[in-house]
Image (spheres, rainbow, N blue to C red):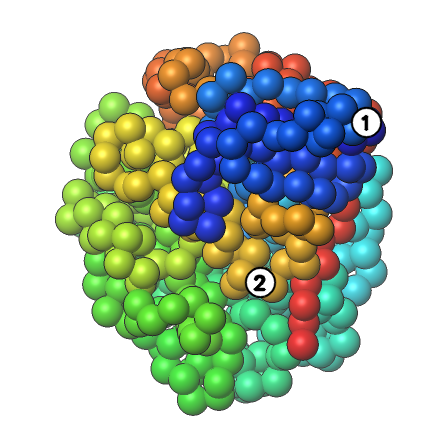
């Protein structure tokens, strides 16, 4: 593309706001400055992008997506879902291992990376999945190119439920990387399910979902995991918190001082159980969307520092798969295209300050996973950059949804912001509604020391 400058911009980076510019040459940022760029700098740039006062920020890093590739690609695949990601300002993602086959061997891990190198528009990293019998694989994994180990404490695809005590002890005490957990107590889920079926029959509406996957289900599992992590010094990351009670298990010290961290997802910050009447199974996730009080507590914890990052748990299903009772409808939904818009809507509503959104979606994921040279607008860092029109509304419609599944729980909602452009490694990959497929993202690197 040649040296590019984005100027006349409202830049938000590292808790600072200023009017200024960002320049980059090929992959890397060369200049970040305040005010107007010098004539010499402007003349040195082949591409001059006048932002006209638009917001310019680092690209979003989403540490929890399910792009369904391989084996479940009728719902989504790396190519389609990475396109949805860059359309939403997400420049890097970390994909989960519950595919078909699951990513629980070194061979399957490298196959995913090869696939992404061919088709992914965004930068990528793939978790290796834990099972009850693959500890040797987890210990042999190269964590300088792998974000961590994913452990399902609740059932998932294939044999990925880890419930053997000796295996959990080995994972928590021996794995030299982040252990990221889906934290729900499987035995209690089954007990609750049997109770409600016995009392009300099997045709349970979705309103029973947060009763089956209850606060106790989440708290019991997370408390056990935190206890083990404390005992063994594990670098534990608890994905998609959904309850107020779990928050008492976490600290709000600076992220650099934590070994146990937490994530909130946009759907748990936006929806409550009162939305089931309107949206039904479209907002059925695991863990379940819960009460207004739970949502309020998660929002507060994000501000206070008990919750460290915001992600999506993007998990597309066909609409046909979202039909049925709460026992049969698939859990999960597409979110990666609209997560930044959701968080910027919170800014408009005075729920969160803008610098907090950038911190929790860009800086902190990079800091938590020690992503090399990403997550900030800094000289020498990769030019992963998003330009957002702050006063241009965007209405989610079926025709502008890029996820392969073709629907969104936000369909019909009008956000007050629009993602104008997304750059990945200095390449313009999304421009005012158009995906540009001339480049590919890179495999993320992690400082695993």
Q: Residue furthest bottom?
A: 231
- Residue 81 against residue 96 in the figure, above or below: above
Question: Does the residue at mark 2 contact the one at mark 1 (Cβ under 8 Å)?
Answer: no
- Which picture quadrant has residue 67? top right
Say which residue appears at 38% left-offset and 69% top-offset.
Answer: 254
Q: CA distance from mark 2 to mark 1?
A: 30 Å
Say which residue appears at 43% left-offset and 74% top-offset.
Answer: 258
Instruction: From the top left corner, tell me how far across and down residue 29 is, in percent.
Output: 69, 43
The label number, if any, that marks residue 246 in the structure image = none
Say which residue appears at 38% left-offset and 51% top-offset.
Answer: 264
Q: Is residue 388 left or right of residue 92?
A: left
The residue under label 2 is 369
The residue under label 1 is 1
Q: Is residue 181 left or right of residue 175?
A: left
- Residue 378 against residue 46 in the figure, above or below: below
Q: Is residue 406 left or right of residue 240?
A: right
Work out whether mark 2 precedes mark 1 in sequence or the reverse, and give the earlier one: 1
Q: Residue furthest front?
A: 39
Nearer to the camera, 83 or 67: 83
Label 1: few (<14), some (14–19) or many (≥20) C-alpha neighbours in 10 Å: few
Find numbered disc 1 in the image and state the secondary structure of the residue it sits on: loop
Task: Check the picture and name the quadrant holding the C terminus.
Answer: bottom right
């Amino acid at each position: 593309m040649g040296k590019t400058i984005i100027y006349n911009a409202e830049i938000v980076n590292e808790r600072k706001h200023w009017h200024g510019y960002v320049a980059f040459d090929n992959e890397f940022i060369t200049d970040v400055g305040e005010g107007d760029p010098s004539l010499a700098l402007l003349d040195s740039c082949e591409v001059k992008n006048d932002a006209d006062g638009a917001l310019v920020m680092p690209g979003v890093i989403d540490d929890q997506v399910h792009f369904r590739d391989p084996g479940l690609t009728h719902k989504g695949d790396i190519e389609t879902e990475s396109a949805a990601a860059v359309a939403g300002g997400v420049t890097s993602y970390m994909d989960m291992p519950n595919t078909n086959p699951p990513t629980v061997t070194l061979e399957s891990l490298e196959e995913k990376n090869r696939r992404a190198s061919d088709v992914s528009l965004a930068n990528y990293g793939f978790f290796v999945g834990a099972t009850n019998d693959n500890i040797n694989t987890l210990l042999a994994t190269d964590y300088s190119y792998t974000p961590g180990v994913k452990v399902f404490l609740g059932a998932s695809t294939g044999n990925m439920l880890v419930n053997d005590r000796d295996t959990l002890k080995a994972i928590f005490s021996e794995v030299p990387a982040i252990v990221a957990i889906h934290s729900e107590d499987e035995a209690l889920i089954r007990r609750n399910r049997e109770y409600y079926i016995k009392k009300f029959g099997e045709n349970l509406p979705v309103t029973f979902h947060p009763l089956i996957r209850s606060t106790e289900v989440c708290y019991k599992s997370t408390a056990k995991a935190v206890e083990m992590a404390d005992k063994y010094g594990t670098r534990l990351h608890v994905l998609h918190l959904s309850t107020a009670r779990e928050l008492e298990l976490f600290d709000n010290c600076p992220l650099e001082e934590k070994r146990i961290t937490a994530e909130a997802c946009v759907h748990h910050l936006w929806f409550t159980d009162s939305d089931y009447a309107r949206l039904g199974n479209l907002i059925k996730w695991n863990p379940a969307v819960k009460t207004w009080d739970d949502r309020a507590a998660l929002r507060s914890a994000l501000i206070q520092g008990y919750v460290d990052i915001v992600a999506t748990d993007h998990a597309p299903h066909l609409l046909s798969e979202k039909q049925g009772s709460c026992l049969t409808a698939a859990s999960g939904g597409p979110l990666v295209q609209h997560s930044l818009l959701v968080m910027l809507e919170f800014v408009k509503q005075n729920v969160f300050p803008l610098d907090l959104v950038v911190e929790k979606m860009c800086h902190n994921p990079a800091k938590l996973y020690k992503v090399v040279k990403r997550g900030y607008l800094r000289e020498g860092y990769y030019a992963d950059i998003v330009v957002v029109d702050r006063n241009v509304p965007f209405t989610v419609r079926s025709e502008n949804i890029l996820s392969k599944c073709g629907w969104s729980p936000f369909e019909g909602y009008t956000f007050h912001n629009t993602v104008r452009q997304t750059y990945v490694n200095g390449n313009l990959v999304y421009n005012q509604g158009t995906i540009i497929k001339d480049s590919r993202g890179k495999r993320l690197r992690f400082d695993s020391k």
